[in-house]
Amino acid sequence: MSRVIVIGSYVQDHCWSAEALPAPGESRIGQFSTGPGGKGFNQAVAANRLGASTRFVGALGRDPLGDTARSFAAGEQLDCAWFETDSPTAASSIVVDAQGRNQICVALGANDALPAGAASAATEGIARGDILVAQLETALTPIQQALDAARAAGALTLLNPAPINPGLNQALIAASDLITPNETEFMFLLRHLLGEQQPLDPITADDQALHQRCRQLSNGTVVITLGGDGAFVSHAEDVLRGDVRNCYRVPAAAVEVIDTTGAGDAFSGALAAALALHPDAPFADLVGFACRAAGLSTERPGTAPSMATPADLRARFGDGGLL
Protein backbone atom coordinates (compact mmCIF):
# COMPACT_ATOMS: atom_id res chain seq x y z
CA MET A 1 0.00 0.00 0.00
CA SER A 2 1.18 3.52 -0.77
CA ARG A 3 2.08 5.63 2.26
CA VAL A 4 1.62 9.28 3.19
CA ILE A 5 4.66 10.86 4.82
CA VAL A 6 4.17 14.36 6.23
CA ILE A 7 7.14 16.50 7.19
CA GLY A 8 6.11 19.70 8.90
CA SER A 9 4.92 21.56 11.94
CA TYR A 10 3.31 20.78 15.25
CA VAL A 11 1.67 23.77 16.98
CA GLN A 12 -0.31 23.83 20.22
CA ASP A 13 -3.40 25.89 19.37
CA HIS A 14 -4.81 28.34 21.90
CA CYS A 15 -8.22 29.36 20.63
CA TRP A 16 -10.60 32.08 21.70
CA SER A 17 -14.14 32.30 20.27
CA ALA A 18 -16.05 35.58 20.34
CA GLU A 19 -19.08 37.09 18.65
CA ALA A 20 -16.83 39.30 16.52
CA LEU A 21 -13.10 39.56 15.83
CA PRO A 22 -11.48 42.26 18.00
CA ALA A 23 -10.65 45.51 16.24
CA PRO A 24 -7.16 46.99 16.81
CA GLY A 25 -6.95 48.09 20.44
CA GLU A 26 -10.24 46.41 21.35
CA SER A 27 -10.75 43.77 24.08
CA ARG A 28 -13.58 41.25 23.83
CA ILE A 29 -14.96 38.62 26.18
CA GLY A 30 -14.91 35.13 24.71
CA GLN A 31 -14.42 31.44 25.40
CA PHE A 32 -11.09 29.59 25.46
CA SER A 33 -9.92 26.14 24.42
CA THR A 34 -6.58 24.56 23.60
CA GLY A 35 -5.63 21.56 21.51
CA PRO A 36 -3.15 20.03 19.06
CA GLY A 37 -2.57 21.65 15.68
CA GLY A 38 0.04 22.87 13.25
CA LYS A 39 -0.28 22.56 9.51
CA GLY A 40 1.88 19.46 9.19
CA PHE A 41 0.36 17.65 12.16
CA ASN A 42 -3.18 18.52 11.08
CA GLN A 43 -2.54 17.12 7.62
CA ALA A 44 -1.03 13.93 9.03
CA VAL A 45 -4.00 13.42 11.38
CA ALA A 46 -6.39 14.02 8.48
CA ALA A 47 -4.68 11.43 6.27
CA ASN A 48 -4.33 8.92 9.11
CA ARG A 49 -7.98 9.16 10.15
CA LEU A 50 -9.06 8.52 6.56
CA GLY A 51 -7.24 5.20 6.49
CA ALA A 52 -3.97 6.01 4.75
CA SER A 53 -0.77 4.55 6.22
CA THR A 54 0.70 7.79 7.57
CA ARG A 55 3.94 8.93 9.19
CA PHE A 56 4.59 12.39 10.62
CA VAL A 57 8.03 13.98 11.05
CA GLY A 58 8.28 17.13 13.14
CA ALA A 59 9.99 18.99 15.99
CA LEU A 60 9.05 19.63 19.62
CA GLY A 61 10.50 21.38 22.63
CA ARG A 62 11.35 19.62 25.88
CA ASP A 63 8.25 20.94 27.62
CA PRO A 64 4.69 20.02 28.64
CA LEU A 65 3.30 21.05 25.24
CA GLY A 66 5.61 18.50 23.64
CA ASP A 67 4.22 15.88 26.00
CA THR A 68 0.71 16.86 24.87
CA ALA A 69 1.70 16.33 21.25
CA ARG A 70 3.08 12.86 21.92
CA SER A 71 0.02 11.87 23.93
CA PHE A 72 -2.44 12.96 21.24
CA ALA A 73 -0.46 11.24 18.48
CA ALA A 74 -0.39 8.01 20.51
CA GLY A 75 -4.14 8.20 20.96
CA GLU A 76 -4.51 8.58 17.19
CA GLN A 77 -2.14 5.65 16.57
CA LEU A 78 -0.19 8.02 14.34
CA ASP A 79 3.41 6.97 13.62
CA CYS A 80 5.66 9.93 14.45
CA ALA A 81 9.36 10.76 14.30
CA TRP A 82 9.86 13.61 16.78
CA PHE A 83 13.02 15.74 16.88
CA GLU A 84 13.59 17.42 20.24
CA THR A 85 15.07 20.92 20.14
CA ASP A 86 16.18 23.52 22.66
CA SER A 87 13.42 25.80 21.38
CA PRO A 88 9.93 25.61 22.93
CA THR A 89 7.12 23.68 21.28
CA ALA A 90 5.33 25.97 18.83
CA ALA A 91 2.14 27.70 19.95
CA SER A 92 -0.57 29.76 18.28
CA SER A 93 -3.19 32.32 19.21
CA ILE A 94 -6.44 31.88 17.27
CA VAL A 95 -9.52 34.07 17.53
CA VAL A 96 -12.70 32.84 15.82
CA ASP A 97 -15.89 34.87 15.32
CA ALA A 98 -19.52 33.76 15.07
CA GLN A 99 -19.21 33.37 11.27
CA GLY A 100 -16.25 31.00 11.62
CA ARG A 101 -13.68 33.56 10.42
CA ASN A 102 -10.35 33.64 12.21
CA GLN A 103 -7.24 35.63 13.07
CA ILE A 104 -4.09 33.62 13.78
CA CYS A 105 -0.61 34.37 15.12
CA VAL A 106 1.96 31.57 15.43
CA ALA A 107 5.25 31.38 17.35
CA LEU A 108 7.14 28.73 15.35
CA GLY A 109 9.45 27.73 18.20
CA ALA A 110 10.81 24.22 17.62
CA ASN A 111 9.50 24.20 14.04
CA ASP A 112 11.99 26.88 13.12
CA ALA A 113 14.72 24.57 14.43
CA LEU A 114 13.61 21.50 12.45
CA PRO A 115 16.99 19.85 11.70
CA ALA A 116 18.30 18.55 8.39
CA GLY A 117 17.97 15.03 9.79
CA ALA A 118 14.21 15.38 9.53
CA ALA A 119 14.47 15.11 5.74
CA SER A 120 16.27 11.78 6.05
CA ALA A 121 13.68 10.52 8.55
CA ALA A 122 10.88 11.50 6.17
CA THR A 123 12.37 9.90 3.07
CA GLU A 124 14.06 6.78 4.43
CA GLY A 125 12.50 3.86 2.55
CA ILE A 126 10.22 6.12 0.52
CA ALA A 127 9.19 4.50 -2.75
CA ARG A 128 7.32 5.08 -5.98
CA GLY A 129 3.65 5.53 -5.22
CA ASP A 130 4.21 7.07 -1.78
CA ILE A 131 3.16 10.67 -1.20
CA LEU A 132 5.38 13.18 0.61
CA VAL A 133 3.51 16.19 2.01
CA ALA A 134 5.19 19.40 3.18
CA GLN A 135 4.31 22.98 4.15
CA LEU A 136 6.12 26.24 4.97
CA GLU A 137 5.61 26.43 8.77
CA THR A 138 9.09 25.14 9.60
CA ALA A 139 12.69 25.78 8.65
CA LEU A 140 12.70 25.46 4.85
CA THR A 141 16.02 23.66 4.26
CA PRO A 142 14.80 20.22 5.40
CA ILE A 143 11.58 20.75 3.43
CA GLN A 144 13.56 21.32 0.23
CA GLN A 145 15.80 18.34 0.97
CA ALA A 146 12.82 16.06 1.63
CA LEU A 147 11.00 17.13 -1.54
CA ASP A 148 14.13 16.60 -3.64
CA ALA A 149 14.85 13.16 -2.13
CA ALA A 150 11.24 12.02 -2.48
CA ARG A 151 11.12 13.18 -6.10
CA ALA A 152 14.38 11.32 -6.83
CA ALA A 153 12.85 8.13 -5.35
CA GLY A 154 9.83 8.40 -7.63
CA ALA A 155 7.38 9.40 -4.89
CA LEU A 156 4.66 12.01 -5.46
CA THR A 157 5.42 15.35 -3.80
CA LEU A 158 2.69 17.67 -2.48
CA LEU A 159 3.53 21.13 -1.16
CA ASN A 160 0.96 23.16 0.72
CA PRO A 161 2.63 26.61 0.41
CA ALA A 162 1.27 27.84 3.72
CA PRO A 163 1.55 29.93 5.70
CA ILE A 164 2.76 32.78 3.49
CA ASN A 165 6.53 32.62 3.86
CA PRO A 166 8.89 35.14 2.19
CA GLY A 167 11.58 32.44 2.14
CA LEU A 168 9.65 30.46 -0.46
CA ASN A 169 11.56 30.15 -3.73
CA GLN A 170 11.03 28.63 -7.15
CA ALA A 171 13.09 25.56 -6.22
CA LEU A 172 10.45 24.48 -3.69
CA ILE A 173 7.71 24.81 -6.31
CA ALA A 174 9.81 23.00 -8.93
CA ALA A 175 10.30 20.04 -6.57
CA SER A 176 6.54 19.66 -6.05
CA ASP A 177 4.25 17.58 -8.25
CA LEU A 178 1.23 19.27 -6.68
CA ILE A 179 0.76 22.53 -4.81
CA THR A 180 -2.35 23.43 -2.79
CA PRO A 181 -2.43 27.16 -1.97
CA ASN A 182 -5.58 28.95 -0.87
CA GLU A 183 -6.60 32.07 -2.76
CA THR A 184 -4.53 34.45 -0.60
CA GLU A 185 -1.45 32.24 -0.81
CA PHE A 186 -1.89 31.87 -4.58
CA MET A 187 -1.98 35.64 -5.04
CA PHE A 188 1.17 35.90 -2.89
CA LEU A 189 2.87 33.34 -5.17
CA LEU A 190 2.00 35.43 -8.22
CA ARG A 191 3.48 38.54 -6.61
CA HIS A 192 6.47 36.83 -5.01
CA LEU A 193 7.54 34.50 -7.82
CA LEU A 194 6.12 36.07 -10.98
CA GLY A 195 6.36 39.73 -9.96
CA GLU A 196 2.69 40.52 -10.61
CA GLN A 197 1.71 43.77 -8.94
CA GLN A 198 -2.03 43.15 -9.25
CA PRO A 199 -2.45 39.37 -9.29
CA LEU A 200 -5.66 37.70 -10.40
CA ASP A 201 -8.24 36.92 -7.75
CA PRO A 202 -8.84 33.18 -8.31
CA ILE A 203 -12.41 33.37 -7.02
CA THR A 204 -13.53 35.82 -9.71
CA ALA A 205 -10.95 35.24 -12.47
CA ASP A 206 -11.75 33.69 -15.84
CA ASP A 207 -10.81 30.01 -15.79
CA GLN A 208 -8.50 30.16 -18.81
CA ALA A 209 -6.68 33.24 -17.52
CA LEU A 210 -6.28 31.56 -14.15
CA HIS A 211 -5.07 28.34 -15.79
CA GLN A 212 -2.47 30.35 -17.71
CA ARG A 213 -1.12 31.87 -14.47
CA CYS A 214 -0.96 28.42 -12.87
CA ARG A 215 1.07 27.13 -15.84
CA GLN A 216 3.51 30.03 -15.46
CA LEU A 217 3.84 29.29 -11.76
CA SER A 218 4.34 25.51 -11.76
CA ASN A 219 5.02 22.59 -14.07
CA GLY A 220 2.88 20.40 -11.82
CA THR A 221 -0.76 20.34 -10.81
CA VAL A 222 -2.04 23.42 -8.99
CA VAL A 223 -5.10 23.10 -6.76
CA ILE A 224 -6.31 26.42 -5.37
CA THR A 225 -8.62 26.00 -2.37
CA LEU A 226 -11.34 28.65 -2.33
CA GLY A 227 -13.25 28.04 0.88
CA GLY A 228 -16.98 28.20 0.24
CA ASP A 229 -16.26 28.51 -3.49
CA GLY A 230 -14.69 25.06 -3.69
CA ALA A 231 -11.43 24.55 -5.56
CA PHE A 232 -9.81 25.30 -8.91
CA VAL A 233 -7.62 22.67 -10.57
CA SER A 234 -4.97 23.29 -13.23
CA HIS A 235 -2.97 20.45 -14.81
CA ALA A 236 -0.02 20.42 -17.18
CA GLU A 237 -1.18 19.23 -20.61
CA ASP A 238 0.88 16.03 -20.43
CA VAL A 239 -0.13 15.07 -16.84
CA LEU A 240 -3.92 15.20 -16.47
CA ARG A 241 -4.00 12.64 -13.61
CA GLY A 242 -6.96 10.75 -15.04
CA ASP A 243 -8.97 13.88 -15.86
CA VAL A 244 -10.26 14.82 -19.31
CA ARG A 245 -9.84 18.60 -18.84
CA ASN A 246 -6.72 20.57 -18.07
CA CYS A 247 -8.57 23.00 -15.79
CA TYR A 248 -11.91 23.09 -13.96
CA ARG A 249 -13.64 24.07 -10.73
CA VAL A 250 -14.98 21.71 -8.05
CA PRO A 251 -17.83 22.97 -5.83
CA ALA A 252 -17.55 23.11 -2.06
CA ALA A 253 -19.61 20.84 0.14
CA ALA A 254 -22.78 22.39 1.60
CA VAL A 255 -21.99 22.70 5.32
CA GLU A 256 -22.89 24.73 8.43
CA VAL A 257 -19.66 26.55 9.23
CA ILE A 258 -18.56 26.91 12.85
CA ASP A 259 -14.77 27.30 12.54
CA THR A 260 -12.76 27.45 9.31
CA THR A 261 -9.40 27.06 11.09
CA GLY A 262 -7.62 24.01 9.71
CA ALA A 263 -9.92 23.51 6.71
CA GLY A 264 -7.03 23.90 4.28
CA ASP A 265 -5.08 21.30 6.24
CA ALA A 266 -8.07 18.94 6.13
CA PHE A 267 -8.14 19.40 2.35
CA SER A 268 -4.43 18.70 1.79
CA GLY A 269 -4.41 15.74 4.17
CA ALA A 270 -7.53 14.23 2.61
CA LEU A 271 -6.16 14.74 -0.90
CA ALA A 272 -2.93 12.97 0.07
CA ALA A 273 -4.90 10.09 1.60
CA ALA A 274 -7.08 9.80 -1.50
CA LEU A 275 -4.03 9.75 -3.75
CA ALA A 276 -2.52 6.94 -1.65
CA LEU A 277 -5.71 4.88 -1.37
CA HIS A 278 -7.15 5.47 -4.85
CA PRO A 279 -4.21 6.22 -7.18
CA ASP A 280 -6.16 5.28 -10.33
CA ALA A 281 -9.25 7.42 -9.63
CA PRO A 282 -9.82 10.58 -11.68
CA PHE A 283 -8.18 13.50 -9.92
CA ALA A 284 -11.47 15.44 -9.98
CA ASP A 285 -13.03 12.74 -7.77
CA LEU A 286 -10.14 13.02 -5.32
CA VAL A 287 -10.54 16.79 -5.13
CA GLY A 288 -14.28 16.43 -4.55
CA PHE A 289 -13.54 14.02 -1.70
CA ALA A 290 -11.02 16.46 -0.20
CA CYS A 291 -13.59 19.27 -0.45
CA ARG A 292 -16.08 17.20 1.56
CA ALA A 293 -13.47 16.36 4.21
CA ALA A 294 -12.49 20.02 4.46
CA GLY A 295 -16.12 21.11 4.64
CA LEU A 296 -16.89 18.69 7.43
CA SER A 297 -13.92 19.98 9.43
CA THR A 298 -15.50 23.47 9.48
CA GLU A 299 -18.56 22.13 11.28
CA ARG A 300 -16.38 21.36 14.32
CA PRO A 301 -14.15 23.55 16.50
CA GLY A 302 -10.39 23.11 16.58
CA THR A 303 -7.88 21.86 14.04
CA ALA A 304 -6.43 18.35 14.45
CA PRO A 305 -9.41 17.14 16.53
CA SER A 306 -11.83 18.33 13.80
CA MET A 307 -10.44 16.03 11.10
CA ALA A 308 -12.91 13.53 9.63
CA THR A 309 -13.02 9.73 9.58
CA PRO A 310 -14.70 7.69 6.82
CA ALA A 311 -17.59 7.05 9.21
CA ASP A 312 -17.95 10.81 9.77
CA LEU A 313 -18.10 11.47 6.02
CA ARG A 314 -20.56 8.65 5.42
CA ALA A 315 -22.85 9.89 8.19
CA ARG A 316 -22.69 13.50 6.98
CA PHE A 317 -22.82 13.07 3.20
CA GLY A 318 -24.05 9.50 2.68
CA ASP A 319 -22.24 7.26 0.20
CA GLY A 320 -21.23 10.41 -1.68
CA GLY A 321 -18.89 11.25 1.18
CA LEU A 322 -16.43 8.55 0.13
CA LEU A 323 -14.78 7.61 -3.13
Image: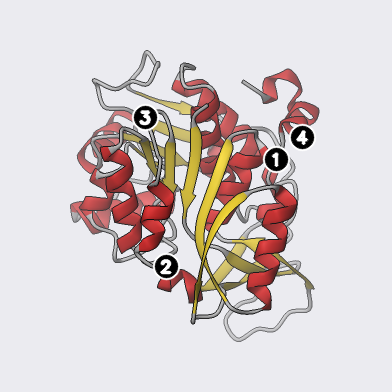
Three-letter amino acid code of the residue under disc 4: Asp
Q: Residue shown at 70%/40% (left/top)?
A: 308
Q: Is residue 211 left or right of residue 315?
A: left
Q: Quadrant of residue 267?
A: top right
Q: SS of the residue at dot 2?
A: loop
Q: Amino acid at mark 2?
A: Leu
Q: Position of residue 270 (x, y in %)?
A: 57, 37
Q: Amino acid at mark 1?
A: Ala
Q: Are marks 1 and 4 in contact (CB under 8 Å)?
A: yes
> 274 or 69: nearer the eye?
69
Q: Secondary structure at mark 4?
A: helix
Q: CA distance from mark 3 to mark 2?
A: 25 Å
Measure how far apart labels 2 and 4 are at the Cα level: 33 Å
Q: Is residue 19 above or below residue 39?
A: below
Q: Which residue is mark 1?
A: 308
Residue carrying label 3: 128
N-term mark: 1 or 2: 2
Earlier sequence position, callout 2 versus callout 4? 2
- Residue tagged by mark 2? 114
Query: Secondary structure under badge 3?
Result: loop
Q: CA distance from mark 1 to mark 3?
A: 27 Å
Question: How packed is label 3: few (under 14 Cα within 10 Å), some, or many (20 or more)?
Answer: some
Q: In the image, is 76 to the left or to the right of 121?
A: right
For mark 1, give the secondary structure: loop
> Residue at left 50%, top 35%?
3
Q: Nearer the viewer, residue 37 or 104?
A: 37
Residue at label 4? 312
Indicate which label's residue lies in the foreground, 1 or 2. 2
Residue 25 is at least partly visible in this image: yes
Q: State yes or no: discs 2 and 4 in contact (Cβ < 8 Å).
A: no
Q: Which mark is residue 115?
A: none
